[in-house]
Amino acid sequence: MRRGTCNLFVAVQPQAGIRTVVVTDHRGKADFVALVRHLLATTYRRARCLHLVLDNLNTHFARSFVDVLGERRAAKLLRRVRFHYTPKHASWLNMAEIEIGVLARQCLNTRLASRATLECNVQAWQQRRNSEHRPIDWTFTRQVADVKLGHRYVS
């Protein structure tokens, strides 16, 4: 019997080998805003500016912050955030997708009895991966991207 689903937001600092995984009930605007607020308050509390590379999910935009927090609070938070988007139909360029694949193979490859079990497993996986400080060895350069994906960009 299926007892429900949930969402996992995965944030990766690829060169430092740091992953942050947050389990939420949904993947709506409020959940995405909560993730970014969590990142700014914990993992990147000392960062002046947090650069987020995102896919084009309909909640991954500054407007979500305004809708959830209001103009004034959103503007204050967004001063510390810069959005960068992967090309449509090229989410494989998003390094978080790589980590999601690793997470799925190492941690989510079986049915889990409860959300508490999922959160415990994900937390243990995150701590283990972060303690290893394994960076993502990204070899796909901008020059290669220009050759492979140049036709997708408007000059």
Image (tube, rainbow, N blue to C red):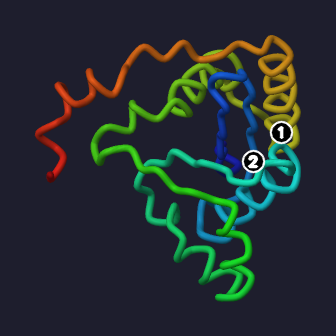
- Which residue lies at the image location 69% right of the left edge and 61% below the top edge? 80
- Which residue lies at the image location 61% right of the left edge and 24% below the top edge? 104
Rendering coords of residue 113 (x, y %): 80, 36
At label 1, the amino acid type is Glu
At label 2, the amino acid type is Val
Rendering coords of residue 37 (x, y %): 77, 61
Label at residue 119: 1
Report the residue that reaches farthest toward the bottom. 71
Query: What residue is pinned by disc 2?
Result: 23
Is 117 on the left-hand or right-hand side of 55? Answer: right
Do tag 1 and tag 2 residues touch (Cβ < 8 Å)? yes
Tally the marks: 2
* Disc 1 secondary structure class: helix
- Which residue lies at the image location 16% right of the left edge and 44% below the top edge? 152
- Which residue lies at the image location 57% right of the left edge and 57% below the top edge? 82
* Disc 2 secondary structure class: strand
